[in-house]
Image (cartoon, grey):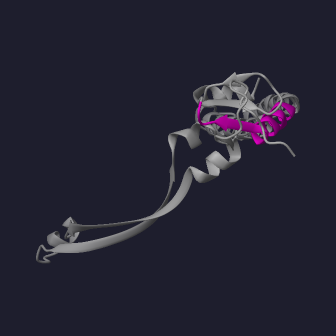
């Protein structure tokens, strides 16, 4: 297998795969912090003597370099079906509360509102499925492109092996989707 060549200079010495840049540019670290805290106000009000306490905390964080952020794996968009379900349940919930609070004849109003909101939710769900069918292939194509992308350290460009098009790292996320 031949290594990828920079489309600008034809050199392969300072080329890194985008996935490797992201992996090497992300590091998990443990952060230890210490500090002091005063006696809680409630304790003082209950008659305890004010005092200062030492506190320690430990947390895990991921530190990511700016280049690794720019070359990160493309994010998958939330499925439209999920959005439709959330919107539909929200409309149903708040609509039922509103009808219950405002109308005196609640039985027929509840049933009518339930039917209307169920129709709206069904339409949103059908639309969401259509949108998902369109966006899933685009996402899969972006992932394939990301997995085949390389970064030239010398020219600070990103390219796909065998493709003469190049882009700057800051334009990489948009480039993946086109």
**Which residue occupies the foreground of this view, 148 or 110?**
148
Residue 23: x and y in percent read 63, 52
**Is the residue 36 above or below the residue 104 in the image?**
below
Q: Name the quadrant containing residue 153.
A: top right
Q: Determine the residue positioned at 84% across, 27% down.
A: 127
**Which residue occupies the foreground of this view, 178 or 76?**
178
Residue 2: x and y in percent read 84, 42
Q: Name the quadrant containing residue 68.
A: top right
Q: Determine the residue positioned at 58% across, 28% down.
A: 170
* 47 horizontally vs 54: left or right: left
Residue 138: x and y in percent read 82, 30
Q: Point out the stretch of residues depicted in magenta.
A: 136-154
Residue, far bottom: 48
**Which residue occupies the foreground of this view, 155 or 110?**
155
* 130 horizontally vs 164: left or right: right
Label total for image: 0
Any part of residue 106 in sight: no
Q: Determine the residue positioned at 79% across, 35% down.
A: 145
The quarter in which the C terminus is drawn is top right
**Which residue occupies the foreground of this view, 63 or 12?**
12
Is 111 covered by the magenta stretch?
A: no
Is 142 covered by the magenta stretch?
A: yes
Magenta region's main secondary structure? helix
């Amino acid at each position: 297998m031949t290594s990828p060549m920079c489309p600008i200079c034809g050199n392969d010495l300072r080329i890194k795969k985008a996935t490797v840049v992201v992996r090497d540019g992300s590091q998990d670290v443990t952060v230890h912090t210490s500090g002091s805290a005063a006696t809680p106000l409630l304790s003082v009000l209950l008659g305890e003597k004010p005092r200062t306490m030492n506190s320690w905390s430990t947390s895990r964080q991921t530190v990511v370099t700016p280049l690794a952020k720019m070359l990160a794996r493309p994010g998958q968009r939330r499925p439209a079906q999920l959005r439709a379900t959330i919107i539909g349940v929200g409309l149903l919930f708040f609509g039922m509360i509103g009808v219950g609070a405002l109308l005196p004849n609640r039985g027929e109003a509840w049933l009518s509102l339930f039917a209307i909101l169920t129709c709206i939710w069904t339409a949103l769900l059908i639309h969401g499925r259509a949108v998902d069918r369109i966006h899933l292939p685009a996402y899969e194509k972006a992932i394939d492109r990301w997995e085949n992308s390389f970064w030239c350290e010398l020219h600070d460009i990103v390219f796909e092996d065998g493709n003469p098009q190049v882009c700057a790292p800051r334009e990489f996320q948009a480039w993946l989707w086109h």
